[in-house]
Image: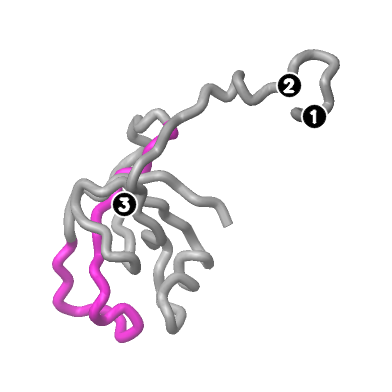
Amino acid sequence: MDMILGQVIGEVIATIKDEAVHGRKLLVTQLLTPKREPIGRPQVAIEVVDAGVGDFVFLVRARDASFAVVPNAPADLAIVGVIDHWDTVDPGSLELPFGESFYT
């Protein structure tokens, strides 16, 4: 399962939904890079962890998204975590020095 970074940027009002998602919020999300830059167009995701507008979130796609809603629901994108705080690390700082095979 791949986790995707995103930010909730809006809400969706739907008067008619599939019974499996009845009572769940649908939120508009913008997918992000680790540097918080937007990727593509905003997408609607089903919410299962009490996220709200402005929150940075983790999302899952496809089959993993349908598993996030119990019982399984017809969902292609689901919010499965709210990010309280994150620090980014330069990927170069994780590289081992030449000749080393592990960190001690």
Pointer 3 local density, CA inside 10 Å: few below 14, some 14–19, many at least 20: some
Residue wearing tag 1? 102
Q: Amino acid at mark 2?
A: Leu
Looking at the picture, how far across and down is residue 50, in whole percent?
A: 27, 65
Q: Which mark is residue 43?
A: 3
What span is colored magenta in the figure? 12-34
Looking at the picture, how far across and down is residue 2, in whole percent?
A: 55, 52
Q: Amino acid at mark 1?
A: Phe
Q: Is residue 27 magenta?
A: yes
Q: Are marks 1 and 2 in contact (CB under 8 Å)?
A: yes
Q: Amino acid at mark 3?
A: Gln
Distance from the alpha carbon under mark 3 to that under mark 1: 40 Å
* N-terminal label among 3 and 2: 3
* N-terminal label among 1 and 2: 2
Residue wearing tag 2? 96
Q: In which quarter of the view is residue 31 placed? A: top left
Looking at the picture, how far across and down is residue 21, in whole percent?
A: 31, 78
Task: Provide the secondary structure element on which disc 1 rests.
Answer: loop
Q: Can you say whether 79 is above or below 98 in the image? A: below
Distance from the alpha carbon under mark 1 to that under mark 2: 7 Å
Q: In which quarter of the view is residue 49 placed? A: bottom left
Q: Is residue 44 magenta?
A: no
Q: Nearer the viewer, mark 3 or mark 2?
A: 2
Q: Which mark is residue 88?
A: none
**Looking at the image, which is closer to me, 67 or 100?**
100
Write the residue at 31% across / 46% down: 56
